[in-house]
Amino acid sequence: MAKKTRRQLLRTECEHLCRDIVFERDGHRCVRCGATTRTAAKLDWSHLIRRSRCTRLICDPDNSVVHCRDCHYFHGANEGMSMLQIAVLRPAQCLRLVEKYDQSVRESNKNSGYVPISFWEEQLERLKDLTT
């Protein structure tokens, strides 16, 4: 097994921290149906804008919610409908997300989609600030 690069280690640390922040924020329950680990087999850390669409938003709490497995599948198959539901439930979160997505797309276009290691270092610091 290959040794992870510094970039991979930073991203993994950001992902774990972001997941913890989102689960805490959402009260360890599905934002769509309200399921908890007592009522659902598994809760997932779900991205509103797919990971493949915008690498810079993978570890942004505004781009994440908690879904039970069934609602996560629904979200994946009906992304537009799911986004509308989140917009109704959390309009401020969705407005911030749209602004960040727009900025991220402009930044990615400048850099051909490359995400520098400094981005992950800064993201990790922002996430740590959210937990204190």
Image (spheres, grey):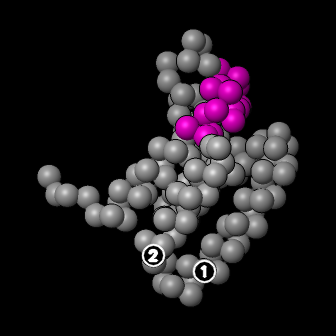
State the mark number for residue 107: 1
The quarter holding residue 70 reads top right
The residue that mark 2 highlights is 116
Give, as a three-letter code, the residue at label 1.
Answer: Glu
Q: Dot 2 surroundings within 10 Å: few (below 14), some, or many (20 or more)?
A: few
Q: Residue at x 72, y 48 (%)?
A: 83
The amino acid marked with disc number 2 is Pro
Q: Nearer the viewer, mark 1 or mark 2?
A: 2
Of the image marks 1 and 2, the number of the one nearer the N terminus: 1
Q: State the SS at label 2.
A: loop
Residue 109 at x, y percent in the picture? 57, 84
Residue at 52%, 45% in the rendered image: 17
Q: In x, y percent, where is residue 128?
A: 58, 50
Residue segment shown in magenta: 20-35
Quarter of the rendering containing residue 100 = bottom right
Whether 24 is among the magenta residues is yes
* Rendered position, 54 above or below 107: above
